[in-house]
Image (cartoon, rainbow, N blue to C red):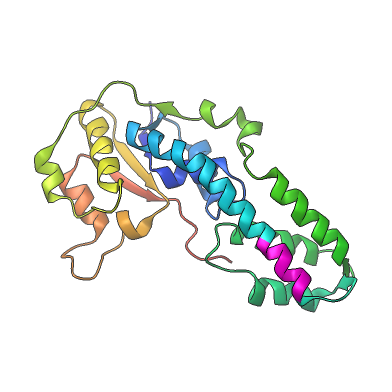
Amino acid sequence: MGRISVLDTGVLVGMVFAQDQHHDKCLQYVLNTNGPVYITPCVGKEFQRLSSKVPKELKREVQDHRKNLIRRFNKTKLDLTDLVNIQQNILDTNDRAHRFLFEYYENKKKKKGSVKFREIKNDLSNIAMEIGKDACQSHGGFESLIDPWTKGMKKYPAVEKNLLVHEGDDKDVCLEAHHIATVETEDTELATANPKHFIRQIPGEPVSRKQNILFVTNIAHIEDTSLANYP
């Protein structure tokens, strides 16, 4: 058996929704694992909450982008300069859908000549309608790629006290991953799409979050599956 993987909520969200900023890296991470991929109770509960919230957010971003294009362009065709302008100046890098839309325009740029504006508007409408579908369907669906942890959890007050992670449910994610690492014999890896909370050093803290987690827990490694900057 290979290394055990434990996913944080961002990785699960990323792999399930194709339009999410981190989709490609999250899905490839899970597909490339050769051991169990566990979803802890905390992550499962948070995913249930986000599984309806995230698609609405993505759909709104795509629909708002489409409206923005209609306001900005009064022409029937868009040329290469227009497409580059959309990528560089109109797409919002803070949006979850930024990576997906950027790649959409990359594919449009590969066509010779201009692109009908009507085609782009229709594409964006169809993209918005498709949001929410399981992006792992070609691999048997996301539920076939993960293993919900059902063997119970224990409390670790000493570990909890020494963890620097404190935002939201992130500390619980660490503690649950620590429990799995404690009761299982194989090395346990925590995969995260949130390097700010789980990996980087926060101003005012003595060490990086990654150093702290690996020091006070039995987690063997932390893997960053985020797409920090795109392109």
**Where residue 6 appears, x then y in whole percent?**
36, 37
Name above or below for residue 159 compared with residue 22.
above
Tell me if 81 is positioned left or right of 167 in this view.
right
Apparent side of residue 162 relative to residue 6 in the rendered image (left or right): left
In percent of width and height, residue 39 lies at 39, 33
Q: Name the foreground residue: 157 vs 223.
A: 157
Residue name at image x 18 percent, y 65 percent: 205
Question: How many numbered marks have been drawn onto this rendered protein structure?
Answer: 0
Residue 169 vertical position relative to residue 68 in the rendered view, above or below: above
- The quadrant the C terminus occupies is bottom right
The image quadrant that residue 74 belongs to is bottom right
Q: Is the N terminus in the top left, top right, bottom left or bottom right quadrant?
A: top left
What secondary structure characterizes most of the magenta part?
helix
Q: Determine the residue positioned at 55% across, 57% down.
A: 96
Return the residue found at the far top. Answer: 151
Is 197 on the left or on the right of 207, as rendered? right
Spot occupied by residue 222 in the image (x, y as percentages of width and height) = 33, 48
In this rendering, the answer to whether 33 lies above or below 100 is above
Is residue 69 magenta-colored? yes
> Which residue is drawn at the image coordinates 72% and 75% (left, top)?
84
Left or right of 14 in this view: 205:
left
Query: In the rendering, at what x and y percent does residue 102 appear?
Result: 66, 63
Magenta residue span: 64-71
